[in-house]
């Protein structure tokens, strides 16, 4: 974060990557819940852990829904830049090549997406 409380682009990128991966993260947590259900031990402790993990999965999925709602507000090109950068983890050069745009344009579009995300709020 900078002195104004804004996230740096690298932090925003990491948040976006996490949001793209929420379904995989939730699946892993659900597998852990399944293992806990079949484990032996203190049932009270296991139930508490299962409840805690279910809340985490719910919170992740709510953030994912909010993120999807945000991406719907983006134009197609900006959304594609975001997807290629954060879901497919492509370099600026590869994104520019794939989209037939200049690298400067791709970076500018991504910066606009980051600013729009901060204005949209409640994503990170």
Image (spheres, rainbow, N blue to C red):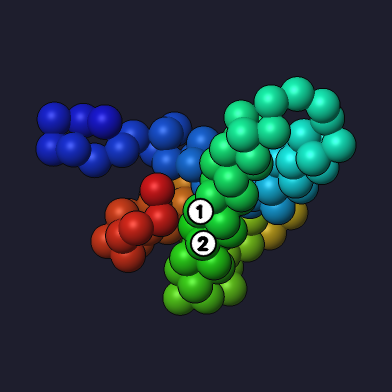
SS for dot 1: helix
Residue 108 position within the rendered picture, expressed as x and y whole percent measured from the top left: 42, 52
Q: Rate crowding at label 2 as few (under 14), some (14 to 19) or many (20 or more) other CA atoms within 10 Å.
A: some
Q: Nearer the viewer, residue 35 or 119?
A: 35
Q: Residue furthest right?
A: 38
State the separation of the CA atoms marked 2 and 1. 5 Å
Q: Rate crowding at label 1 as few (under 14), some (14 to 19) or many (20 or more) other CA atoms within 10 Å.
A: few
SS for dot 2: helix
Residue at (21%, 30%) from the top-left corner? 2
Note whether residue 4 is visible: yes
Residue 121 position within the rendered picture, expressed as x and y whole percent measured from the top left: 31, 60
Q: Return the residue at label 1.
A: 59
* Residue 39, quarter of picture: top right
11 relative position to 94: left or right: left
Residue 62's disc is: 2
* Residue 33, quarter of picture: top right
Residue 124 position within the rendered picture, expressed as x and y whole percent measured from the top left: 40, 48
Note whether residue 60 is visible: no
50 relative position to 122: left or right: right
Quadrant housing the N terminus: top left
Residue at (18%, 38%) from the top-left corner? 5
CB of mark 2 within 8 Å of CB of mark 1?
Answer: yes
Residue 95 position within the rendered picture, expressed as x and y whole percent measured from the top left: 66, 48
- Relative to 8, residue 111 above or below: below
């Amino acid at each position: 974060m900078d002195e104004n409380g804004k996230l740096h682009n690298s932090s925003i990128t990491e948040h976006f990557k996490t949001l793209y991966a929420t379904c995989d993260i939730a699946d892993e947590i659900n597998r852990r819940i399944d293992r806990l259900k079949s484990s032996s031990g203190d049932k009270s402790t296991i139930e508490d852990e299962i409840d805690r993990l279910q809340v985490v999965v719910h919170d992740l999925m709510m953030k994912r829904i909010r993120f999807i709602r945000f991406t719907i507000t983006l134009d197609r090109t900006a959304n594609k830049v975001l997807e290629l950068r954060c879901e497919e983890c492509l370099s600026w050069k590869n994104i520019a090549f794939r989209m037939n745009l200049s690298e400067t344009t791709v970076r500018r579009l991504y910066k606009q997406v980051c600013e729009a995300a901060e204005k949209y709020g409640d994503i990170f």
